[in-house]
Amino acid sequence: MKAMSSFKLVFMLIFLSAATLCHADDIRIGSNGVFYFNNKKYHSELTTLYSAIHFSDRFFVSGFIDKKGNDSYFIKEINPENGTSVSWQQKNKIFQFYALANKLYAVRDERQIIKLEDNQWVLEKEIKPRSYVIQTEPLIACTWGQDTLDSRYRLDPVCYSPDLGWQKDVFWTTTAVEPKICHGQLRVLVSYHTKHALHWEVMVMDPEDGQEIIRVPFSGTKRGLDLCSITLTQ
C-alpha cells in the first residue's frame, strides 16, 4: 500500500450499540446490568455489563457483581423467554465477544481468548494482556496498555498480529473509539500532547505488515465514532 500525498476528511458519526464483532446492532447495553434487544428490556442481574452478543438465537453478556467491594466477574447466558440464566464465573474481565465459524469466543482481559465448547469455556489461544480483537483471521488486535508505578508491570499499548508476525507501538488512547480495518486499512485513533494541548490523529496502517502509511489530523473525538466512516480521498 502506498502513502497518499494529500487528504480530505469527510466525517460522519455513528453510535455503536455494543462492543462485539457479531450482531452489534441487535443489542444495546444500558446501565445497572440492563440490556435491550429489539427495544425489549432484559435484566442480567450483574452490577455492570461490559459486552453483550446475540449468537445463534442465544443471549450472552459479560460483566461483574460488586460484592462489598470485591468484584466477581461473570459470563452469563440469559433466556429471553423467562429471564433465567446460566453463569460462568471468570477470574478476569471479559470485555469482548465475537463469533467465528459458528463458534462463540470471548476475550479475557488477561492474555486469553476462550471458546464456548460443550457448554464450557475453554482456552483457545494466548494473546497479549488487555487486547481488543479487531480481526479474527488472521488475528489482528490492539492493546490498551497499562501505566503502573511498578515498571515491571507497565504495558505499553501496541497493535499486533501473531499470525502475520508484526507488532507496532500505537498510542491508542480512547477505548470508546475502536480500531477498525476498512478499505484495506487498519485505522486507529491516537493522540499526543504539545504545549499542554491534546491533539488527535487517525493513524492509518497496512494490516498485512503493520507499517504506518499516514497520520491524518482529527478534530476532537466522540464516543462510538466509526473510523470507517472517515473517507480519505487524494
Image (cartoon, rainbow, N blue to C red):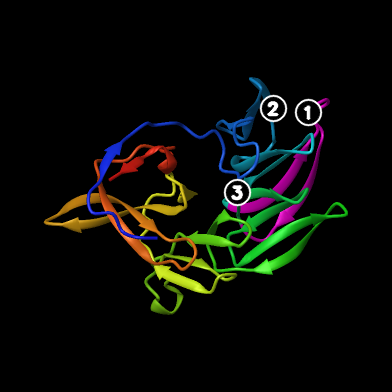
Graded by Cα atoms within 10 Å as few (under 14), some (14 to 19) or many (20 or more), the crowding at tag 1 reads: some
- Which is nearer the N-term, disc 2 or disc 3? 2
Identify the amino acid type marked 2.
Tyr
Q: Secondary structure at mark 2?
A: strand
In the image, residue 152 above or below residue 200: below
Q: Secondary structure at mark 1?
A: loop
Taking the image as shown, residue 13 lies to the left or right of residue 141, namely left
The residue beneath circle 1 is 80
Task: Find residue 149 and report its horizontal and vertical position in percent.
Answer: 37, 71
180 or 125, nearer to the observer = 180
Q: Secondary structure at mark 3?
A: loop
The answer to which image quadrant residue 196 occupies is bottom left
103 or 106, nearer to the observer = 103
The residue beneath circle 2 is 42
Q: Residue 68 shows which numbered tag?
A: 3
- Which is nearer the N-term, disc 1 or disc 3? 3
Task: Find residue 216 and report its horizontal and vertical position in percent.
Answer: 27, 50
Q: Residue at x 33, y 34 (%)?
A: 11
